[in-house]
Every structure is written in structure tokens, then in C-alpha cells.
Amino acid sequence: MKEKVQAYIKEIDGFIATTPEDLDEFRIKFLSKKGLIPALFAEMRNVAPENRKEFGAILNNLKNRAQQKINDLKETLESSKDSRKDDVDLSLPANFMEPGSRHPLSVVRNEIIDIFSRIGFSVSEGPEIEDDWHNFSALNFPEEHPARDMQDTFFIEKNPDIALRTHTSSVQVRVMEKEQPPIRSIFPGRVFRNEAISARAHCIFHQVEGLYIDENVSFADLKQTLYYFATELFGKGTKTRFRPSYFPFTEPSAEMDISCFICGGKGCKICKYTGWVEILGCGMVDPNVLENNNIDSNKYTGFAFGMGIERITMLKYQINDIRLFFENDLRFLKQFESAV
């Protein structure tokens, strides 16, 4: 029995703990209910009565020795932990998370809104799910117009009168229903068309449309407004030209080109060597559209315009694939941190 005690003393004195887990294993081994020292106390019934007092003192000394070892090692571990805290240099800068970047479409959208806001245009928004009246009929689309075809529009199957809006012109109708001239507003938003996705086309894209209705509004007002916009967005040396076109809700209608800001009008791949780049459609609001929205076409005139944000962004940053805007590739998005 005494040989066991001497062996335990040697093991206790030589034990070193480097972690709290090591120390807990030591405690369980020697002092738990089923540990080595309580087992020795249980053997006292086998000791002769005249030797029990001496043996009890030896076991109590062993138990106290083990407990003291645990207390000493616990204090050492805690002081070591505190010293590691002191080693931290609190003057060092924190490890901040890497900041995100604005999406290029958001950058250009905000820039367009800011330009028109400076000349008095307010911003209006509307629902992305529209009825036939706001999306087509009120805008002078005949029943047989190709834009009503299933190839262009995402109709709601249970109700063919409801569709995902194909342009933000539907917001123009909602504004004209609620307000009387003068009206001067732009309408940014997401639109949907049933088109095959490719490098140049997508079934989801974004537009900014504008509407100005008042007395004596002319095509000259439209041209000056859009010329101001083009020079503010693309630079003061930008030239513009208008080509006749057709839209159901404007008459006369036109498409506006700007001089290529890449080659300066000399001809390049961006402008297909013509020196001009198309950026938007526009025209004078058709009198039928005004009357459909209870605005007196004999008293008021107006102009409207619309542009695709993706197209302008691709031109501005020379991006050759529209699908990049929807892939959330951080390598692509990080290129626009400086554009915010």
C-alpha cells in the first residue's frame, strides 16, 4: 500500500498541465469519486486497526497534495492566459471587412436621375405587374400591335389581362391619371420581355422614361432637354442627332443618336464605324394618350422619352455582354468601386 502512495506522490509532483482539459483529466484520475485516492481510502478496511490512524494521515496528506497541485496549475494557466491578452497590441488597426461596391446599373441609374433632377424632373415609380390598360391600351397600342404578342410579353396565365410590364411607360399612365399638368417626371424601373438571353439581349432589363406635359411644349423643348442630358452624361463635346421613328404613344417619334464618345465620331467597333451611337427613343405625346388620361389635348402638349440603362451602361463602360450584369461575379463588380 505504501508503495502505491509513493508512486502516486511521484506522479502528482511530476505532472504538468498545458491546457484546462489536461488539468481536468488529472483531477478526475486522482480525486473523482472513482479516482485513485478515494480507492485507497476504501482499502482502509483491510488495514490493521492499530495502523489505521497512521495510514489515514498518509492518505489525507496525499489528497491535499493532489488538490494543491490542481490549485497551483489552475493559477498558472489563468496567469498565462492573462499574459497572452497583454501581448495584444491594441494600437494596431482593426481587420475591417472588405467594403462592397455599387452595381454598375445602380451607378448609371443614379447618375441619370441626378441629371434630370437638376432640371426639375421628379421621380415616380409603379408596379411591375400591370394590367392591359396601363401597359398597352392607354398608350395607344392597337389590339393587333406586335408588342401584344406572346413572343414579347410575359402574360399571367390565369388572367391574360395581367402581364409583367414591358416598359415603364405604364407609370406615365398612372401619373397622368392622378395629376394634372404641368407634369415633369422620370420613371426608372425594371421591365420584362419574353426574349432569348444572349450577349446583347435579356428577358429582364431596366429603363428610365421621362414625361413632360404643359402648355406650349414643343419638339424643340424635347431636343434641348435631351441634348443637356447627353452632354452631362457623356461629356460637353457630345453631339446629337434625331432620326424619324415610330412609337404608338408618340407622334412625331424619333430615335436619338450621340456622337461616339470612344472614337470622337471617326468610326470604331462601338459605333460600327458610323461615328454615331443610338441611346434612346422619344417623341411628342400622341393626343390620343392625353385624352385617354383625361388631359385636354387642345390645351396641353408634351414629350416623352425612354432609354435602356443596360445599353447606356454598356456604352459608358465598354461592356460587351449584358449577361454580366446579372451574374453577381465579384471580379466584375469590383471594377466599379471608383465609379460610386
Image: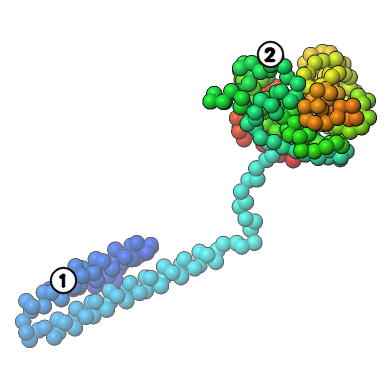
In the image, is 61 to the left or to the right of 336? left
**Quarter holding residue 256:** top right
Q: Which x, y percent locates residue 123?
A: 77, 39
Q: Nearer the viewer, residue 233 or 301?
A: 301
Q: Is residue 259 above or below residue 127?
A: above
Count every numbered label the image shows and give the total: 2
Identify the residue under disc 1: 39
In x, y percent, where is residue 107?
A: 74, 37
| Mark nearer the N terminus (1 vs 2) | 1
- The residue nearer to you, when weighing 287 against 113, is 287
Q: State which quadrant residue 7 falls in.
A: bottom left
For label 2, the residue is 144
- Closer to the camera in the image, 110 or 150: 150
The colour scheme applied to this rendered structure is rainbow
How far across and how far down the image is residue 280, in percent?
Answer: 80, 23
The residue at 64%/61% (across/down) is 91
Image location of residue 174, percent across then percent down: 73, 34
Snapshot quadrant of residue 289: top right
Residue 235 appears in view: no
> What residue is shown at x 82% (from left), y 13% (from top)?
273
Judge the density around disc 1: few (<14), some (14-19), many (≥20) Cα neighbours within 10 Å: some
Identify the amino acid type marked 2: Glu
Residue 154 numbered mark, or none: none
